[in-house]
């Protein structure tokens, strides 16, 4: 009876792994809790199929594929073809990891390959090692598929760090397995080993599920921030248009007066002097259209007005690239975050200056923002850290920039020039 309870627990764990695997790459139809319960329910059916057919491998394999296919179709937006493909991958991973663990235990630890049949403790520990290894491989493969879709480099790095726990756990459980199979331990010691093994398995799931939810919330915050920036950009666009319309009306009104004055003049020298006098006034009127990239022009015009209102020198040098290979929403997210940080950094300084430049050098496109800065920003290695007191709700600007840059196979780099009191933030795109 105890053995059957353990196997049911193993099936439940397999159900949770299936949820983690599919949720990495496909849109979920229900809330995570509901989706996990659906998975557990279907895997429970697989458990009873195993009992009824007395652990028949062929029937178990067929049931495993059908259960995973049914689960991913019920809970996720996925095609039948993709469902069959991923269900087959899960079956292959499970078969290979079980083979590796059982043969590895026999070869490396010198434990008979069927030792677990005579020891419930060995059975539990070996089974849990199998599932942890199965979980690690599934997570690596699902993360690899996720990277191909989203190019989420930061998420990949974070997941790699999390793998340290299950790897260490596997090493400890292997030690427990060797001790339990080699020495005649008391019932209490065996029970402790079993409990620690089960708890370790649970923590593997909990850690990755919590991390996944955290990443989801972080991505939602970044998306909301990007949407807010686009809304601001739209609002700024209408405000700029209104201001341009007012300027045009004033300009037309002034030109009428200027033309009337010129018309009343008879001396050509006097006319030339008058035109020379009013020419700077006409040149002052600025128009959107510096780069021939509509969204880039709008962003530049918006920050030109922001900087003018805050008495900040905003210098733009657009050379051989107008960043037209970047989608509008991504361009807004990237440049708005970079320039917002620059504006915030220079406020209150003497002679505040922000310089934005873009240029193409061979196969690379470089976008650079330089702003005056009196002290080196707070950083952890190459990672910038927000200095705001409520840091829990800030610091997403840099993450948003990195996410956009990674999407276009670019890299971010910054440095602080102490000799000139300047902060340099560069984005480099490879355009081969």
Image (cartoon, grey):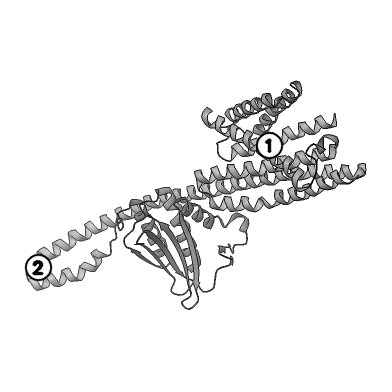
> Quick check: 82 left or right of 37?
left
How far from the left and from the top, in percent, is residue 86? 57, 34
Seen as rendered, the residue at the extreme bottom is 419
Q: Secondary structure at mark 2?
A: loop
**Vertical arrangement, residue 214 with respect to residue 253, above or below:** above
Question: Is residue 131 visible to us here?
Answer: yes
Of 423 and 267, the residue lying toward us: 423
Question: Is residue 79 visible to us here?
Answer: no
N-terminal-most mark, 2 or 1: 1
**Vertical arrangement, residue 317 with respect to residue 51, above or below:** below
How many labels were placed on the picture?
2
Q: Quadrant of residue 103?
A: top right
Q: Which residue is mark 2?
A: 265
How far from the left and from the top, in percent, is residue 302? 39, 57
Residue depicted at x 10% and y 65%: 264
Quarter of the figure that contains the C terminus? bottom left
> Quick check: 120 left or right of 350?
right
Q: Which residue is mark 1?
A: 16
Quarter of the figure that contains the N terminus? top right
How far from the left and from the top, in percent, is residue 29? 58, 32
Seen as rendered, the residue at the extreme top is 52
């Amino acid at each position: 009876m105890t053995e059957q309870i353990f196997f049911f627990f193993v099936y439940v764990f397999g159900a949770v792994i299936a949820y983690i695997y599919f949720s990495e790459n496909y849109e979920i139809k229900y809330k995570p809790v509901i989706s996990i319960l659906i998975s557990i329910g279907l895997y429970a059916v697989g458990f009873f199929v195993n009992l009824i057919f007395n652990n028949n491998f062929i029937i178990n394999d067929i049931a495993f594929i059908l259960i995973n296919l049914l689960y991913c179709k019920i809970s996720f937006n996925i095609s039948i073809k993709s469902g069959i493909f991923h269900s087959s991958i899960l079956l292959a991973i499970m078969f290979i990891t079980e083979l590796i663990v059982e043969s590895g235990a026999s070869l490396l630890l010198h434990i008979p390959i069927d030792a677990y049949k005579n020891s419930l403790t060995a059975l539990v520990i070996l089974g849990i090692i199998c599932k942890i290894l199965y979980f690690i491989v599934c997570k690596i493969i699902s993360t690899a598929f996720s990277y191909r879709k989203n190019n989420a480099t930061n998420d990949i790095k974070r997941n790699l760090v999390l793998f340290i726990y299950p790897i260490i756990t596997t090493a400890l459980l292997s030690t427990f397995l060797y001790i339990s199979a080699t020495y005649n331990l008391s019932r209490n010691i065996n029970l402790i080993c079993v409990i620690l093994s089960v708890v370790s398995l649970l923590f593997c799931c909990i850690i990755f599920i919590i991390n996944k939810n955290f990443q989801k919330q972080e991505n939602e915050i970044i998306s909301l921030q990007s949407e807010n920036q686009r809304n601001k950009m739209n609002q700024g666009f209408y405000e700029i248009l209104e201001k341009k319309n007012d300027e045009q009306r004033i300009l037309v009104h002034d030109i009428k007066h200027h033309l009337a004055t010129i018309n009343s003049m008879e001396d050509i020298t006097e006319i030339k002097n008058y035109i020379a006098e009013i020419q700077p006034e006409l040149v002052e009127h600025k128009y959107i259209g510096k780069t021939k990239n509509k969204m880039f022009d709008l962003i530049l015009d918006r920050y030109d007005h922001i900087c003018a209102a805050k008495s900040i020198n905003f210098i733009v040098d657009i050379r051989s690239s107008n960043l037209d290979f970047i989608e509008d929403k991504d361009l807004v997210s990237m440049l708005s975050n970079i320039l917002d940080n620059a504006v915030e950094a220079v406020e209150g300084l003497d002679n505040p200056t922000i310089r934005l430049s873009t240029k193409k050098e061979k196969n690379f496109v470089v976008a650079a923002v330089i702003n005056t800065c009196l002290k080196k920003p707070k950083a952890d290695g190459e990672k910038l850290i927000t200095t705001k007191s409520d840091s829990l709700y800030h610091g997403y600007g840099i993450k948003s920039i990195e996410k956009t840059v990674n999407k276009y196979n670019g890299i971010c780099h910054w440095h602080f020039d102490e000799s000139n009191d300047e902060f340099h933030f560069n984005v480099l795109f490879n355009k081969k």
